[in-house]
Image (tube, grey):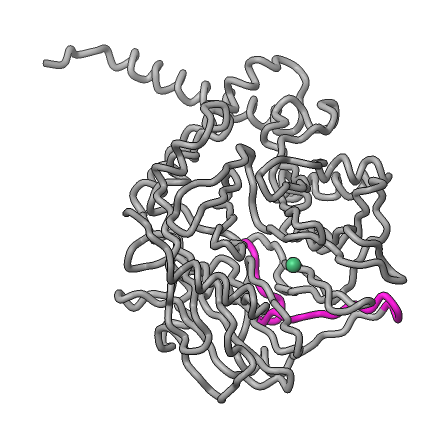
Amino acid sequence: MFKKIEIWILYLLILIFFISLILFGGFLKYSASGGKKLQNLQIVANYISDIPLNFIKILRTTNDPGNHFVDKSMKNIKEKNGFTFFKNNEILKNKLLILSRYDGDKKKGVVEVVDLNNFKVIHRYEPDSKSLLKNLSNDYKKKYPTTEIDLSENRMFLWHPYIEENGNLIFNSSSPLFNIDICNRVNWVIDKYFHHSLEKNFENNYWATHGVLSKINEKYIGKKSSDWSDDGVVKVSSNGKILYEKSFSEILIENNYQNLIFTHLQNPINNDFCHLNDLQPTFNNTLYWKKDDIFLSCRNLSTIFHFRPSTGKIINVIQSSLISGQHDVDIIDNKTISIFNNESFHTTNGFELINQVSSIVHYSFDTKEFKKMHSKILENSNFGTRFGGLIQYLNDKSFIVEEQEHGRILYINNKDELIWSYINKANNGKVYVLRWSSIVEDEDKAFKIKKIINEKKCIN
Ligand SMILES: [Ca+2]
């Protein structure tokens, strides 16, 4: 069946193979160090070198439905599934929890509306991934070739969902921005790549974070600008039209902060210099900000930027030795913001928690002081998440905090006492991640949502 070949030919082939391997490796190193010669050959060599990693990525995503969203640390594995109550509390009466979680039993991302009078799930949003995909343009799918996998039934999730009083839900899944109705039917889609945060502003528009292809000059970042991740801020109208957008690198360059873009060039996270993970609009004029300014949180710079879209100006750069790898900036009062401080930093082992717990930091514009809050209760609860997570204060200064990667929510009253906890556990005993839940505090809005849910007539 096989022909015999001379042994010297075999040795010659092995020799050629090793010489080719050395030359290929050397050429890749030359390319990675910014070599300018043989540009076309560099593109081909880099494309070939990407094949093994891309192949592994595809294998992982197609063979591991659900496993991607398991908390592999097993941190909360001994906790009871669902809600556990520690103290009586009436504050949340007539309010709703909008619970975004990966359902480990159904192996899909869902949003549940929980009635906080009795902690019963009164509605579930379970959008059909095929109908979401159907609404995307071919251009988008071409630009983001893993879209079919990322939005497949087992892989999609509903990130930072915002519920309207008519029951519509707006969310992204590291994907376009979707607006669906109470029966999971698509109202509108914005065919751009959104991620992380969505916040409503004073005029009922939304501010959202999205990823954009970098517009930074090629002479700085080379031809593979598609590998250079940039973020942007987008203002979207309630009927899904884009009213304003600007890339984060443009904001920094126009404000003479280009040094912050290139700080991380030698860092493993260099292609994600900002990692914009929250965008918080202001609702009034105060001594320290104007209505519809936004606070932008860049995790990879451990920095909050106070930005004024109306003038394009960065007003303030907020940094502290206390803050590292943060998510979620919120406005507390006319002179204070809170920062969900993951206290995580990027090492050669990936992201790690500095002190094993995450913290909440308040910054006062008045005194210019940073202060850690609720430390004792968060430490006693062993609360910490390297990625994601958020805090929401209610009017009485009680709050929920979400431990995203460990699938847990804590509700803590204004005396720093734990009232209840929630764990996202499946029947297989594993804990699955959460994706930024919130409380509908406005009782009138909660009432209208409940009415829509009670009267819905969905044909599914
Ligand atoms: Ca926020």
Residue 388 percent coordinates (x, y): 56, 58
Residue 331: x and y in percent read 73, 64
Q: Is residue 264 visible?
A: yes
Instruction: Name the one closer to the observer, 246 or 324.
Output: 246
- How many tags in the picture? 0
Find the residue positioned furthest to the bottom: 87
Q: Residue at x 26, y 66 (%)?
A: 427
The answer to whether 227 appears left or right of 317 in the picture is left
**Hey, which quadrant is residue 385 in on the image?**
bottom right
* Residue 295 shown in magenta: no
- Classify the position of ligand 1 by quadrant: top left, top right, bottom left or bottom right: bottom right
Residue 349 visible in the shown view: no
Does 174 appear above or below 343? Answer: above
- Side (left or right) of 257 relative to 32: right
Residue 334 in picture, x, y percent from top left: 81, 67
On the rendered image, what quadrant is the N terminus found in? top left
Q: Is residue 222 above or below residue 350?
A: above
Q: Residue at x 49, y 30 (%)?
A: 144
Residue 327 sits above or below residue 403 on the image: above
- Segment tinted magenta in the rendering: 349-368
- Compared across the picture, whether 289 is left or right of 235 comes to right
Residue 357 shown in magenta: yes
Q: Nearer the viewer, residue 1 or 104?
A: 104
The foreground one among 311 and 355 is 311
The image position of residue 281, as x and y in percent, is 72, 54
Above or below residue 288? Residue 185 is above
Using the image as rendered, state which of residue 226 and residue 202 is in the foreground: 202
Q: Residue at x 38, y 47 (%)?
A: 127
Q: Residue at x 82, y 42 (%)?
A: 310
